[in-house]
Amino acid sequence: MNEKRARAERPEFKARRSRILYQVTTLIVAVLIISGLVTFFLVRNSQEKLIKESIDKVVTTEVENLSNTFDYLISTMVVAQADKLNVQDVTAFSADILAGKITDVQRYAIDQFKAMVDSGFFGMEYILLILPSSGLIKEPFIMAANDESLIYNWELPDYIAQAMGEGEHYLLMEEGIPELGLEDAHLVIFTHTPSPFMPNYDVVTISIIPMQERIDSINAFYNSERNSISLTLGLVVLFSIIAVTLITFFLLSYLIRKRITEPVDELAASAEQVMQGNLDVEITVHEGGDFEGLERAFREMVVSFRKYIAKSTGEE
């Protein structure tokens, strides 16, 4: 039977079988590639979201830690100033403030703020002591700052005034503070402290700290991890596609050969024998095969021919 099948396996059969095999394999590979790309981008997007949330969490945690530290330090400093200066004449003090004069209280705060900034305390660039608006003060203004030129002259930006009025503890300005000529990310910390000179009134200390370097270090860490994970994921997807392609190709080749090619080749070889006048050829019926019905019908046809010829020649 193998000899018959070998004779019947003509070039056109081989070409057709190979064409079907390659077409089906190509289709499966295309589906796998598309699925792999979709999976890669879905995982990448999910990864980007998780990384962004992680960065926000790390930044927020660091900001809150700094904010809590400044709350304590500034509150302690204000109390120390009040005890040291022991201002008695609140009316005269208020009049000097309204007149735009630099008082001894302000001078003390200015010197303290300059010393803190010059020493690199927490990397601060600006410290501003703000008197919020009240019955006597129409608009919030700067009472003291490490940069003396800002006192009475610099108008608070709306977003800072709004955050201060709403009782926020901090603002993270990722694009900087252009009103102060500051670029990149900066942290603005608000410390609300009860005034030692005016009851039921809080003064606000604004501390401005550069945050870009911290954020860049966080981003650099996650970018490194992201690139590593992306490379690993890409390699896994690539090798998975290659492995599935090879397995599919050989498995499909085996199935086509066993379920289609071999039965068809055997039928073709048997048909060739019949065409040459050999009606004693044995037709094999593969039970449960895809061509079982065709094989059975062909065998019955050959048996019928054999009986007909035998009857017509008087052999039966």
Image: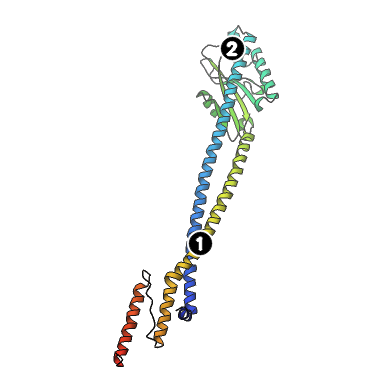
Q: Position of residue 27 (x, y in %)?
A: 47, 63
Q: Position of residue 98 (x, y in %)?
A: 59, 15
Instruction: Please tell me in which quadrant of the rendered image residue 74 appears.
Output: top right
Q: Crowding at label 2, few (<14), some or many (≥20) Cα neighbours within 10 Å?
A: some
Q: Which residue is mark 1?
A: 247
Q: Position of residue 266 (x, y in %)?
A: 42, 77
Q: Is residue 195 left or right of residue 85?
A: left
The kind of residue tagged 2 is Ser
Q: Nearer the viewer, residue 238 or 170?
A: 238
- Quadrant that contains the C terminus: bottom left
- Quadrant that contains the N terminus: bottom left
Residue 231's place in the image compared with 97, above or below, is below
Q: Which residue is mark 2?
A: 94
Element carrying mark 1: helix
Element carrying mark 2: helix
Q: Position of residue 312 (x, y in %)?
A: 29, 92
The kind of residue tagged 1 is Ile
Q: Is residue 181 left or right of residue 47?
A: right
